Image (cartoon, coloured by chain):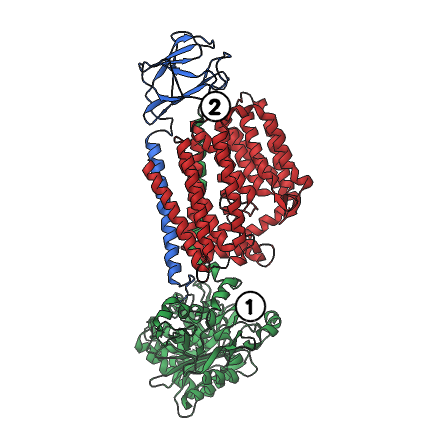
Amino acid sequence: MRFDLLDLSFFGILLKIVLIVIIYIIIVQALKIMSRDVKRGSLAGGKNLGWKLRIVYPGDGGNFVEGDSVPIGNKLTIGRNKFNQMVLPSPSVSNYHAKIYFEDGRYMLEDLNSTNGTFINGIVVDKKSLQPGDEISISQTVLTVTDDE
Amino acid sequence: MTKRLKTLQFLIYLFIFFGFLNLAFLGKPIDPMAGVFFAVITVIVAVTSWVLKKYYPMGDRLIFLLAMLLCSIGMIMLFRLSRTTAVKQLLWLVIGIVMFLFVVLYLKKGLVKYAGYRYVFLAGTIAFMAMATFIGVEILGAKNWVKIGPYGFQPSEFGKIFLILYLSAALSDIKSRKQLIEPGIVIIISLGFMVLQKDLGTALIIFAVSVTMVYLATSKKLYVLISLGLFGAGGAASYAVFGHIRKRFMIWLNPWDYVYNESYQLVQSMYAIAMGGLFGRGLGMGHPGYVAVNESDFIFSVICEEMGLLMGLAILILHFLLFYRSIRSALHAENNFTKLLTAGLSVMMATQALVIVGGVTGFIPLTGITLPFVSYGGTSLLISFLSLSIIQKVSEGDE
Amino acid sequence: MDNLTTNIKRVMIIFLIVFIVLISYLSYFTLFRGPEIATRPDNRRMWDIRNKVVRGTIYDKNGKELSVSEKTKNNQYKRTYKGGAATAHVLGYYDPQYGISGLENLYDSYLSSNISASFMAWVGNGFKEVDKKGDDVYTSLDLGLQQTAYNALGSSRGSVVVIKVDTGEILAMVSKPSYDPNKLGEIWKQLSTDEQRPLLNRAVSGLYPPGSTFKVVTGVSALENIDGIEKETFNDEGKLVLGPDYTLSNDQGKAMGKINFEQAMVKSSNVFFGNLGIRLEKNLFKTAEKFGFNRNIPADGIIIDNSRFPKYDISEKGNLAQAGIGQAEVLATPVQMALVAQTIANDGVMLKPVLVDKVVDYSGNTVKEFRPDEIGQITSPGYAAEIKRFMRDVVAKGTGTRAQVSGIQVCGKTGTAQHLESKNPHSWFIGFAPYKNPEIAVAVIVEEGGYGGTAAAKISSQVMSKYFKK
């Protein structure tokens, strides 16, 4: 075929190919990043460590009694609003008070700018990783982090 | 993981660099504007990425990068087509990013609280969907533009977002079939207005998003089948009633018979894609002038003409990856409203890409919508980044 | 919504499938349908590309210009056809509005070659500006011969094909009615609505019953399949009764008496050959196909429509007989019949008909050069030699005396092809010359030219005379 639909300018050809090569390398990189996530299992709601929160003192009412265990799962939201997973219907608990989530192999507790704060072992925290045995206080409610079955 | 991301980000800079380098050489002897664009876009990507990393290190950073890559491809092509359009797009991009960052950084306290605004969303949906029918003007065969002074916008673009917000609220707590009636009516009204405005692309997107959201909310395949049936029936009815719909099908089935008249746009688009081959004719070497609306609806065709089939495929792949990452964020959300919202927005963007690419290649009838992130269009870009910001927030585990 | 995860996965998969479908379609479209779409005549982009260089020139065998791009007053280029109507069909036309046809189309990629405009060309030229021009095409046509053939047809409709026996080169290919391609724009409307179809290249697309010229093929088939046919004699009573209502007759019902194979050929006995058609049945079909009937005949620079030889059942005696004499539903193009002649002349070897001798690029390099190519050994040299002898006698003392050329031993076969009851039959002649070491093979058809093949034979004589006097 003597007919080149492509223009034969040398640079043109070079740059064309470079651009296409780069974009496909990007796609491959992206795929690699994504497959890592899938392998880590976060897609299916993955394998967290199965920790729970045990109710030591259910001060703020709600449906919990002392001794109850609530699995944290991958994420647990705590607050007054009914859309939370753990509802503490007390006026001194903020609408969206705090959340606990599992990531990078550990559980993190994060305070969501609550009015009265969230405490771990008596110390007010913004964001901190949890250990089994840690005592979490939200208003009048006291919870313990536990890793037993 | 961060190392991979860093490499990816760097590669994106590299891509933008070579793209604009190529454009620079198109000028005689060198076009300095290309350098300016390269610098601006790179800075935008770098700054936004840094902000995301600093404030939301757990969030999904890939989503933003994928979207920016798509933007860059579009930017490169727009620069080649027209300097002024590229500048405008750049401005809209900046506005879009600012809005994106605003939503991500400052709209705290969780998204789920918006579930309470259900009836606000309903009002907004109806208002925006209907707007163009009453105060709109007809442009390029579709009456879906509203002009305010020298600026025009497409109210249906906002309508889509409101609809998704409304559906997320209305469907998040479905326990009985009766609860579906209200959303069902809203969907049908929206579809109706779209058909009246001859904006069939948006109608298709609304349909896809609605069906998906209903399915996700109810898990009942039956509803999907019923909707498909209704869609088919509605489609057949509109085909019978509306001449312009018949025309679209006629053009789609036999494009080569009306080359100089009705199917001119589609034919030129197909020529452009055919001429591009695997690697394209090279930036600046094609004939985008023959393709109508080449900076928005048909931008995909001219990209294929000058940058090749491989670039076109890359765009599709990137859109799919973006969709995948976006809808994956929905899995992280723990309440229904947010889940539905994320899923709905993801489906909206993906469907839009599929519908327009399908149309310009002659796979399905042509419709007048834009390719998200790539096409020129202020409204389109803003809505896309708005959706992206919500998805980004959800990916960070924000409720 | 507990199984939301599953649902979302399902949605993901559905979208994945849709994306894959679209990606496949796009790839298929660009890679497989792309080239064919891109070369559609109404694709203006291709014209822009073609206009980047001056289109190459088409020459005849002797270097005479046939089709040239000439500069017009406003610095545009217009394609000029030096041969006018005589070469209109074989060269085709090249027009942004009406498209590209004929050789201009088949060799478009060479004629529009933009290699001269490339970076490498500039480098190769010592970094100096290169004359941007496409490749030149040197055809095998002989303009003088072509014009003689064209004029010889006079005001009749028909076709003349002349092929070089030992190489397959097409020396002339004429189709009438014709038109002046230099005035395409002005006369297009009239051309495309004319019932006589002046745009049709009758040489490759005209399908006519070959009539008695087909007896050459029947003769070859008989030699190959009926032992001792040369020695057989037959009583020709002027007609062959095949059934209660069907009779095959000679021309005007003339009885030829006791004749043998050779005499049957020389006098063109329908009765004899009709009988052969019945005796050979499927074998005649096989021989016809060997000669190219029902097949795509490979060629260069032209596209030949398929000639047809239907498959008749033993019981259809009428059709078999008619087929033996080149009637019934047998249809042939003039090129097909010219190849029949060329094959006999060339000891039974059919060659690929070729229109282009060589292609030369802007810098004088030969890009493509033609070499003779065999389609196949259609029949043995022995049988070819026998038929050759018969054909010599046809012209020397049989029905083809009008084809004689002084000083040259011409061989051939005449044909009268019946088509519509109400009209004159077509006049055919196929042949080659000289008898010893044949050089050219010819096929002539004059539509509705009358009986005996006289009209066609006369034209052949004129054309051959021109060739041998050169």
User: Can residue C246 be seen in the rendering of this structure?
Assistant: yes
Identity of the amino acid at label 1?
Tyr
Q: Is residue A98 above or below residue C396?
A: above
For label 2, the residue is B335
For label 1, the residue is C98
For label 1, the SS is: loop
User: Can residue B282 be seen in the rendering of this structure?
Assistant: no
Q: Is residue C157 above or below residue A53?
A: below
The chain in red: B
Q: Residues within 10 Å of mark 2 (few under 14, many from 20)?
A: some
Q: Chain of mark 2?
A: B
For label 2, the SS is: loop
In x, y percent, where is residue B269?
52, 54
The chain in green: C
Left or right? Give the position of B292 relative to B7.
right
Chain A, chosen colour in render: blue
